[in-house]
Amino acid sequence: MKLIKKIIKRIIFSCFILYGFNYIANCYNIFLAINYITIFIISILGPFGICGLIFFKYFLLWGFYEWFI
């Protein structure tokens, strides 16, 4: 029961963290989709998960897009 409570708490906390990040980063045109995968990654990795998702989306994907054009 403790484990389930801890998992649910981390999922809810990561939802609020992701929503808050999107709210603040909207000024800089940075947006991360709120879906199951991003919530799962942030639940597991915490702040490093947000940093990793930003790096992946805006540096790797954007860089490859520019490279192929």
Image (tube, rainbow, N blue to C red):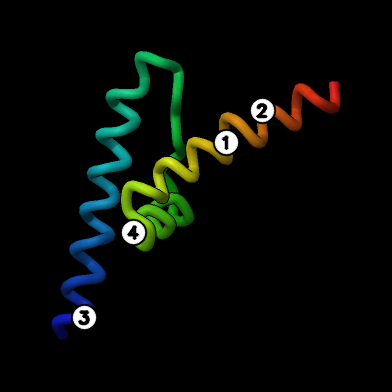
Q: What distance separates the C-alpha of mark 2 from that of mark 3?
A: 38 Å
Left or right: 21, with 69 as reference point? left
| Cα distance in 3D space between marks 3 and 4 | 14 Å
Quarter of the view holding residue 67: top right
Of label 4 and label 2, which has the lower sequence position? 4
- Do callouts 1 and 3 mark residues in contact (Cβ within 8 Å)? no
State the residue position of label 3.
Answer: 3
Residue at x-position 85% and y-position 27%: 68
Classed neighbour count for the residue bearing mark 4: other residues with Cα under 10 Å, few (<14), some (14–19), many (≥20): many
Callout 1, which amino acid? Lys
Is 67 located above or below residue 6 in the figure?
Answer: above
- Amino acid type assigned to the residue bearing label 4 in the image: Ser
Bin the neighbour count of mark 1 within 10 Å (Cα to Cα): few under 14, some 14-19, many 20 and up. Answer: some
Q: To which residue does mark 1 refer? A: 57
The N terminus: image quadrant: bottom left
The image position of residue 46, as x and y in percent, is 32, 53
Q: Is residue 22 left or right of residue 33?
A: left
Badge 3 or badge 4: first in the primary sequence = 3
**Nearer the N terminus, badge 1 or badge 2?**
1
Crowd rating for badge 2 (residues with CA inside 10 Å; few <14, some 14–19, many 20+): few
Q: Give the SS element for disc 1.
A: helix
Find residue 35 and name its label: none
State the separation of the CA atoms marked 1 and 4. 18 Å
Which is more foreground, mark 2 or mark 3?
Answer: 2
* For marks 1 and 3 on the same chain, the one whose residue lies earlier in the sequence: 3
Above or below 58: residue 3: below
Q: Which residue is mark 4?
A: 43
- Identify the residue under disc 2: 62
User: Mark 1 or mark 4, which has the lower sequence index?
Assistant: 4
Contact, mark 1 vs mark 2 (Cβ under 8 Å): yes
Tell me which corner region of the image, top left, top right, bottom left or bottom right, holds residue 21.
top left
